[in-house]
C-alpha cells in the first residue's frame, strides 16, 4: 500500500501519550462490524482509521464480527465484509467472532450475579422501558431486583438450558436506577432468543447484549484503543463498568469520534436494507448506494476511498461532507491511470460525403496525454461515423461552437468537417447529417491554414462496438435522511439513466472493473454484474469536472 500521511488528530495524540506513559506496550485496534448487512463508506472510515493507526505504531488490528444477534445475522454478510476489507487494501492480524467468547461471557455474567451486581428480571421489554425513567426523573426499581444470589444463579442457568420462552426473562446489571446516565439504569445484559446462530448453531438460546459483549470482547482480545462513533459516548461509563466489575485483566480505552455523513447519500444500514428488500435498488451492490460493494461496482478505487477518508480526518463533532469530495479523489487517482478513449452515448450518424466509400484509414491517438508511457492506439476512420446528438443543432443559439449547417468543427484525432445537409424522417426527426471533410486538416500534420472553435468526439460506424452506459445521480434528493416515514418519498426517480451507444473497436476485450476516461464524458467502469462477451456495460463513476474545490473545504 502507498505511504500514508501522518496527519495529527486527537486519537493519534492519545495513543502517542499512552505509549509514552507506558499505559500500553503495543497498540491493538479492532474493526468490529455486526454481520447483519453490507458495509458502507461510513464503515470504511472506521476501517481506515483503525488499520492506519495500528500500522503507524507497529501495532495490530483485529477483524471481529460482533455476532450476538442471531435473528439478523448471516454468513453471507460475514464473507461480504471480509471481501470489502481486503479490497480496501487491509489485512487483519486476527479474525475473531464474538460468539467464540459466549462461554466466557456467560461465566463473567455469573461472576456479576455472585457479586450481587446482576439479577434475573421477569419484566417484559415494554415494562423495562416504562420503568427506566427520563432525563429528569429517576427510574423505578424492578420488583425482582432483590432476588437472592442463589435464586438468580438458578434462574440464569435455567435460562441457558432453554426452560423459558423468548422475552420471558432477562439478566440485568444492578447499578443505579437513579443515575443521570440512562445507560447505567440496570441495563439488560442477556436476553432469550431461541434462534439458530450462524456460528454456534443451536448451542445457545441466551445471547449477550451489545453493551455487555463489546467491552468483554475488547478485553479478551487485548485491544488497547476501542474506537467507536459519537453515539456510544454515553455508553462509555457502562463499558468501563463491565471491564471493571467483570475483573478483566486487560483494560481497553474507549474513544469516540464523529461518524461520516455524506451529502445526498443514504448512509443508515436500515435504510439501505429497506431499499434492497423493496427492490428500489439493484441489490446491495447497486452503484447508487454508498455500500463498499456498490462503490466498487460503480468503479471507485480503493486508493480514492482511502485518500478521501484520510483527507476528511477525525473530529469530535458531526458534520456533513460534500459527496463531490470523493469524486475529486477518484479523478486524482485515475487521471494518470485510466486510458482515454472515445465513446458516443447518444449516437447521431454522420455521412462524410466526399470521403471514399470503401476506404478505412487508421489514425493514431495517445492513450493518455498526461501519461505518455501508456502509449498510443489506432482508431479506424471512414465515410460514416457517430457523433453525440447534442454536438449538432439545426438552429443553434449564439456562441454554439459545435456542428450546425454551414459550420466547421474538428473531429478529435481526425479532420475538420463541415455540415451541408440534414436528413429527417417523415416525422421531422433528424436521422443523420451529411458533411464534407478537408483532407488537409488531418490531426498531427501541423495544419495551420485556419482555426475552428469546436472539437467533438466520434466513433467510426462500421467497426463501432455497441455498449450500454449507465449514468447516475444522487439517490436521495436532500442532504439529510430526515424522518424514517418519509424516507422513500425523497428517493430521486431520475437517479439512473441508461443509454445505448458505441465505443471504439479497440475496447472489444474490456474486462469487468476496467476503467476509462471517455473524452468529454467522464470516468467509466466496466460493470461486473451485467457485462458479458456479447454486451459491454459501463457505469459512469464521476464526470470530468465539478464545481468542487478541495481548498474550499479547508
Image (tube, rainbow, N blue to C red):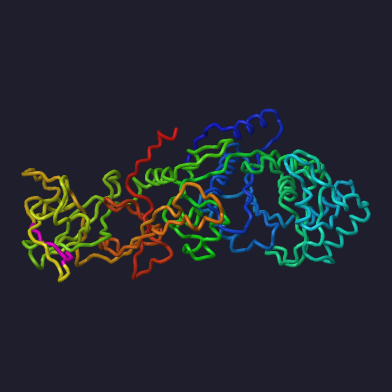
Decide if residue 143 is on the left or right side of residue 335.
right
Residue 336: x, y in percent? 34, 45
Residue 313: x, y in percent? 52, 37
**Residue 307 showing in the rendered view:** no
Please state the extent of the stretch shown in magenta in the rendering.
Answer: 428-436
Q: Is 230 drawn above or below residue 277 in the view shown?
A: above
Of 92 and 13, nearer the camera is: 13
Quadrant of the rendered image containing residue 247: top right
Instruction: Look at 67% across and 31% down and name the residue there.
Output: 18
Of 208 and 124, nearer the camera is: 124
- Residue 420: in magenta span: no
Overall secondary structure of the magenta section: strand
Instruction: Look at 71% across and 46% down and name the residue there.
Output: 218
Quadrant of the rendered image containing residue 232: top right
Instruction: Look at 59% across and 63% down and name the residue there.
Output: 76
Q: Is 270 drawn above or below residue 256 in the view shown?
A: below
Decide if residue 175 is on the left or right side of residue 407.
right
Decide if residue 380 is on the left or right side of residue 18.
left
**Residue 338 showing in the rendered view:** yes
- Residue 431: in magenta span: yes
Residue 113: x, y in percent? 87, 50
Of 32 and 156, nearer the camera is: 156
Residue 377: x, y in percent? 24, 55
Decide if residue 391 is on the left or right side of residue 340.
left
Quadrant position of the C terminus in the picture: top left
Amino acid at each position: 500500500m502507498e505511504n500514508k500521511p501522518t496527519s495529527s488528530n486527537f486519537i493519534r495524540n492519545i495513543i502517542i501519550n499512552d505509549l509514552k506513559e507506558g499505559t500500553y506496550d503495543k497498540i491493538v485496534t479492532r474493526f468490529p462490524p455486526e454481520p447483519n448487512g453490507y458495509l458502507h463508506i461510513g464503515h470504511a472510515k472506521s476501517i481506515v482509521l483503525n488499520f492506519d493507526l495500528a500500522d503507524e505504531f507497529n501495532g495490530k488490528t483485529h477483524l471481529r464480527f460482533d455476532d450476538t444477534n442471531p435473528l439478523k445475522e448471516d454468513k453471507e454478510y460475514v464473507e461480504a465484509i471480509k471481501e470489502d476489507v481486503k479490497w480496501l487494501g487491509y489485512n487483519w492480524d486476527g479474525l475473531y467472532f464474538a460468539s467464540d467468547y459466549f462461554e466466557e461471557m456467560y461465566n463473567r455474567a455469573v461472576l456479576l450475579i455472585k457479586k450481587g451486581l446482576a439479577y434475573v428480571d421477569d419484566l417484559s421489554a415494554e415494562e423495562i422501558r416504562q420503568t427506566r425513567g427520563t432525563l429528569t426523573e429517576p427510574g423505578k426499581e424492578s420488583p425482582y431486583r432483590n432476588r437472592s444470589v442463589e435464586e438468580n444463579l438458578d434462574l440464569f442457568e435455567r435460562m441457558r438450558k432453554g426452560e423459558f420462552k423468548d422475552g420471558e426473562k432477562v439478566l440485568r446489571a444492578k447499578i443505579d436506577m437513579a443515575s443521570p446516565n440512562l445507560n447505567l439504569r440496570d441495563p439488560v445484559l442477556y436476553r432469550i432468543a431461541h434462534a439458530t446462530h450462524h456460528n454456534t448453531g443451536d448451542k445457545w438460546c441466551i445471547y449477550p447484549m451489545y453493551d455487555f459483549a463489546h467491552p468483554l470482547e475488547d478485553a479478551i482480545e487485548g485491544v488497547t484503543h476501542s474506537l467507536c462513533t459519537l453515539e456510544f459516548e454515553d455508553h462509555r461509563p457502562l463499558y468501563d463498568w463491565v471491564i471493571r466489575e467483570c475483573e478483566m485483566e486487560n483494560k481497553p480505552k474507549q474513544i469516540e469520534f464523529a461518524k461520516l455523513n455524506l451529502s445526498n447519500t443514504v448512509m443508515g444500514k436500515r435504510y439501505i436494507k429497506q431499499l434492497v428488500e423493496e427492490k428500489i435498488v439493484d441489490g446491495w451492490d447497486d452503484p447508487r448506494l454508498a455500500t463498499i460493494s456498490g462503490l466498487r461496482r460503480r468503479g471507485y478505487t480503493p486508493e480514492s476511498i482511502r485518500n478521501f477518508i484520510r483527507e476528511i480526518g477525525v473530529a469530535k463533532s458531526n458534520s456533513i461532507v460534500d459527496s463531490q469530495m470523493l469524486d475529486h479523489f477518484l479523478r486524482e487517482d485515475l487521471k494518470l491511470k485510466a486510458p482515454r478513449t472515445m465513446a458516443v452515448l447518444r449516437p447521431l450518424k454522420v455521412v462524410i460525403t466526399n470521403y471514399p466509400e470503401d476506404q478505412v484509414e487508421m489514425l493514431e491517438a495517445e492513450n493518455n496525454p498526461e501519461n505518455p508511457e501508456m502509449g498510443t492506439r489506432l482508431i479506424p476512420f471512414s465515410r460514416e461515423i457517430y457523433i453525440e446528438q447534442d454536438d449538432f443543432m439545426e438552429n443553434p443559439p449564439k456562441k454554439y461552437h459545435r456542428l450546425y449547417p454551414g459550420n466547421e468543427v474538428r473531429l478529435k484525432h481526425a479532420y475538420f468537417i463541415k455540415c451541408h445537409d440534414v436528413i429527417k424522417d417523415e416525422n421531422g426527426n433528424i436521422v443523420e447529417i451529411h458533411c464534407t471533410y478537408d483532407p488537409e486538416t488531418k490531426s498531427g500534420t501541423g495544419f495551420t491554414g485556419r482555426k475552428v472553435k469546436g472539437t467533438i468526439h466520434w466513433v467510426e460506424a462500421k467497426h463501432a462496438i455497441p455498449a450500454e452506459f449507465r449514468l447516475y445521480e444522487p439517490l436521495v434528493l436532500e442532504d439529510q435522511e430526515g424522518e424514517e416515514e418519509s424516507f422513500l418519498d425523497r428517493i430521486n426517480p431520475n437517479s439512473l439513466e441508461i443509454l445505448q451507444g458505441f465505443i471504439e473497436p479497440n475496447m472489444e476485450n474490456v474486462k469487468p472493473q476496467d476503467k476509462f476516461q471517455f473524452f468529454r464524458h467522464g470516468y467509466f467502469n466496466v460493470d461486473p454484474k451485467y457485462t458479458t462477451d456479447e454486451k459491454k456495460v459501463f457505469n459512469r463513476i464521476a464526470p470530468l469536472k465539478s464545481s468542487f474545490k478541495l481548498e474550499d473545504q479547508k
